[in-house]
Each structure stands twice: as C-alpha cells, then as structure tokens.
Image (spheres, grey):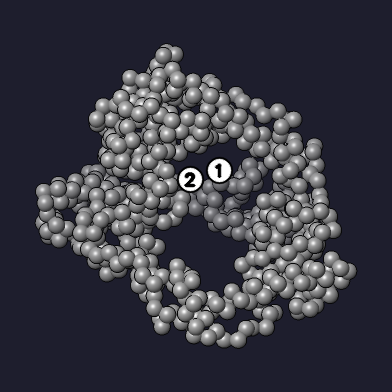
Amino acid sequence: MLDFIRKRSKSFVIQVLFGLLILSFVAWGIDGFIRGGTAPEAVAKVGDVQIGVNQVYDAFRREVDRTRQALGTPIDNEQAKALGIDRLVVQRIVHDTLIDLAGRDLGITVSDQMVRDEIQSYAVFRDEAGRFDRDLFARGLRRSGMTEAMLVEQVRRDLGRRMLVEAIGGGMLAPRAMTDPLYRFRAERRSAEVVMVSPDAIPGPEAPSSEQLASYHETHAARFTAPEFRAVTYIPLRASDLADPTAVPEQRIADLYAEREAQFDLPERRRIAQVVAPDEDAAKRLVSRGGPLADAVELGLLARDEMPLPALADLAFSLAAGEVGGPVQSPFGWHVIQVEHVEPPRRIGLDEARPALREELAGELALDALYELSTDLEDTLGGGATLEEAAATLNLKVVRVPLIDAQGLDADGTEAEGFAATPEFLEAAFQTPESMDSVLTEIGTDGYFVLRVDRIVPPALRPLSEVRDQVAAAWTAERLAGAAKRTAEQLATRVRDGSSLPEAASDVGTTVTVAEAFTRDGGGASIPRPLVDALFAANRGDVVTAAAADGAYLARLTDILAPDASGHAAPRSALAGAVAAEMAQDVMVQLINGLQARYGVQVNPRALDEVL
C-alpha cells in the first residue's frame, strides 16, 4: 500500500538509503547469517522479533512486481529467485527490523499527529481541491486490502525509521577534494573526425548453400526458436462495465452540486487578441488606428487571473467589447490588445452541471460495486467453482486467448488486446501453473481479472523450411557486418600509415563527419557508444575503429576538452549530492553491521524456500 501512496522522499540521500539497500549487506550477506534458532513458522529472527512467512511472501510479491515493471517482461518465482529477489526481500525486512529495534531502544517515538499529517499528505487521498478526502482514503484502503489500523502502524514504523536514518546519514557533505577530480573525469569532452563503413557499401557475398543455412540455423538456434506460448481463459472485471448513470439518485447529484457550489461560479472572461510592437511609437499608432488588429495573436477566452501580465489584465478588463487599448510595456516589447468578446460572469446551474456530476458519481458507485463484485467472485471461486461456473453465477463474461507469449503476441506476431495486453495479465499468465487458476489480480485502479492457464506450449526451434528466408538474411547480414569491420580496420591502418581520412571515406563512397564535444557517457554524441568508448581510451591524434549495429567506424581523435573547474554549478552540485549519498551508504553499512552484532540475526533457509 505504501509503495502505491507514498511516492515521496525527504532528500536524495535518504532515498538512496531506503532504496538501494543491497549495498548495506555486502559485508554480512545472508550466507553469513547464523542458521537455526527460529520458530518453524518464521523465516527469520532479529533480536526478539520473529519475521513470519506472510510478511516475507507479501514483500516478495511486491518486489517481483517492481522488477517486472523495470524489465518490461513477466518473471515467475524461479526466475525471481535466480535474480536473488528472495534474498533481497529478507535483507530489507531484516534491515527495517534492525532499525526499528534501534529506534525503540533509543526512545524514538512517532506521535499520532505526525502519522495523521503524513497520511493526509498523500496525493492519492486528496480531492481535486487538494483536501484530504475520507471517501478516497476508505476506497484506497479497500482496494489495497488494508485496514486503517494496518496503514497507521506501517506509517508509524516508516516515520520512525526515517527519523533515525536522517539523524545518522542525512547531513553528509562530499569534500571538493573528492568531487572535483571526479567531475573533471565525467565532464571531459572529446571531438573526432569519423568515417562510417556501411554494410551497404560492401559487395554482397554469394548466396549461402543449403549446408551453410542448415549449419547457421543450428548454431543460432535461439534466434529462430519460437517462445513459450500459453492458452488462457480469464474473467475481466471493469468499473466501466458497471457504471450506470441512470442509477445515481438525484439527491446525491444535488448534494454534490451544493458541496461544490463555489466551483460553478464562473468569472467574467474576455476573448483577447494581441500585437507586440517593437517600440512605443509603433504601438501608439496601432491603438490610434483601432481594430481589427492586423497580424494579431489570439490569446483565447481568459479570466482576469489567467492573463499573462497583471498590467495587461487591468487594461483588458477596462475596455469595452471591440475596443483597442494600450500600449503596455513588458520585457517582450510594447503590447496592444483588442477585446473581441466579453463573456459576463455566470453561475452554472444544477441542470447544466447534472450530466457531468452524474457521470462522476456513477464512476464512484461503479468502483464500489467493482470491489463488492471482486469479493463475490473470490468467494465463488474459493468455494470450488470453475471460471465458467463462477461467471455464469455472477453473470460475468469469459474471455479465451488461444495462444499468447510473454510479450503479448500470438503465434502470428499479432499483439493481444484488452486485459491480455497488460503487464499484469502477462505476468500472471506466465506464473500460473497449467490447469490452475491465478489469484484475483487488480489492474490499474478500476479493474480486476482472474485467469486459468489451459495449455502450455514449450519453446521449440522452428523448422528451417519455415524460417529459411530469415536464416538467409541473418547469415548475409552477419557476413556483411564482418566485412565492414575488416574494411574499417584496413582503412585505419592506411590512415595511420599516412593516408588521409577523406581518401579513406572516398574508398567506401562516403564523407568524413565531425563528432563534436561528446562526453564519456555518450552525451552529445552522434556516434555509437562503442566508438565513444574507443575514443575515450585514445590519445589525441590516434585512429581507432569500432563496430556497431549499423556498420563499422574508423575515427581520429582531434581534441580533448577539459571542463571549466569554476563553472557548471548545477551538475557539480548533483555530483556532490550523489557522492554524499554514497558516503551515507557507507555509514549505513557500518550501522547495520553494528546492529546485527548487538541484536543477532538468524535465518531459516528451508522456511524461505518453502514460502516461495
């Protein structure tokens, strides 16, 4: 829940301390934990605190979701464990628990008012006017499956940890003796003369023989292997399918209108045209000439507080419709305006506002109905019903996806539609065992789905007869790329021996280009990263080569530009902040090591494997 609603951090240093926790455990990874000593149902014990299986499983699922979003592809539990996510989750929980225990022993307390202020600051619980909305709060808790007491306790713990961490690592400053050399290294720029050897400039090889194609097909089997496909059946639940504007009581519409009465009072607005003259005399001539203004720019229909300049607002709202006025001076010149139309202030009546209010309330009622329907669906499935039986009981739609891969494509490469195209759906589809139902999964803020994997088609090498054209194209492209690389190296040797770059470029039907002032990380570069790396490893005047996806390159390093040590305050400040964060991270490593020694940490690896 907090991952969904917080989205905030007090400082860059604290964000790093809470977000990049792996480094905190380098010196004492899980392999060094004391084995045994935990209760059978506990995954770990920190001091006198037991870490239960449910806590670990919930954190593991959240971390898998974050990793899936970062990678842009579904991952199952085994893949997540291979990435070390299970160990990371336990490390984070242990870290938080150690901080909690230290805060408890130091007497750190978080008042109810601090917790209340923190929760009410979350944007997800605020209405359009920026006020805390109790209904949004309750709806958010329902969607997340948390109670108010659970959220309050979690926020209280997080605030306590933040107070301790900020006190220890929040005031770090990076010394100039450390940041200046690092800045000079990162900000150094280089320039080069470049020649690209395109594969198109290389004579094509003879067509590959059947034996060559067969060998290439076998050697590069992964490139021509069809991915795993799954056949899936699912039930979608959407708030939009449940919205019924006709079911909204008139009294609720009237109550909402009365509650928002002030927003339906529209101020006077004026349609303004403007000309900006270069000097006062020219502006005065425009005013004396009157309207319509030639070559005027339409500013639109604006209220007084929407005008770009206060002086223009005073002028515009003192003129009659059709009148031209000014001039008003600004840094942009001399402004002359014409009031083309005046829309007097008015109140939007209930009848006019009713359609929009009805739609809004219908949407809110649909979200409530969606939550209730999702609960009914879970209960029905929990009673042993199949997806088809549950759908029939609750009058829901069943959707079948014949075959889909982890990227959301069918066997013909066509993209899936609807829920089946979403990362949440694909993750569930490729984590659920064959013939099993997934858990009911929330998608966005207004939908749920539950699915069943009907069939799994494992990855298989496509027969050469089906992919002969692709194999031939890949074989040819590989040989052209190799030939382009060899040509670039031969040309580079000639240039080092005295030939000019223009001569080398002419030999491959191109010209020399100049890449100016690019940085070590490729910033400002019009050349591929492999060539950037080669040029930053070279000395002034050296000729280097590099291969890239679009061809091969040779280049001569022409200039090395050292950064201005006294300028560039913003990037220097950002670098100092990053270095300070690393220093604070080092302090956190020492803190965690000390807390581990004080309280003791025990992990039950068998329990961890069983829960995941």
**Gap between marks 1 and 2 measured at Cα:** 10 Å
User: Residue drawn at (24%, 30%), measured in percent from left and top?
Assistant: 40
Which residue is at the front of the view, 322 or 525? Answer: 525
Given this view, does label 1 or label 2 mark the residue nearer the observer? 1
User: Residue drawn at (32%, 52%), measured in percent from left and top?
Assistant: 443
| As drawn, 494 above or below 200 | above
Near mark 1 (Cα within 10 A), the count class, few <14, some 14-19 or many ≥20, is few
User: Residue drawn at (66%, 43%), measured in percent from left and top?
Assistant: 311
| As drawn, 271 above or below 103 | below
Could you say whether the residue bearing mark 1 is in a helix, strand or loop? helix
Quick check: marks 1 and 2 in contact, CB under 8 Å? yes
Q: Is residue 276 visible?
A: no
Q: Quadrant of the C terminus?
A: top left
Residue most extreme to the right: 498
Which residue is at the front of the view, 525 or 567? Answer: 525
Q: Find residue 183 and name its label.
A: none
Give left or right: position of 198 versus 115. Answer: right
What is the x, y in percent for residue 127? 38, 39
Amino acid type, label 1: Asp
Mark closest to the chain's N terminus, 1 or 2: 2
Q: Find residue 305 and name its label.
A: 1
Q: Quadrant of residue 176?
A: top right
Could you say whether the residue bearing mark 2 is in a helix, strand or loop? loop
* Tag 2 residue: 267
Near mark 2 (Cα within 10 A), the count class, few <14, some 14-19 or many ≥20, is some
What is the x, y in percent for residue 315? 64, 46
Give left or right: position of 20 versus 408. Answer: right
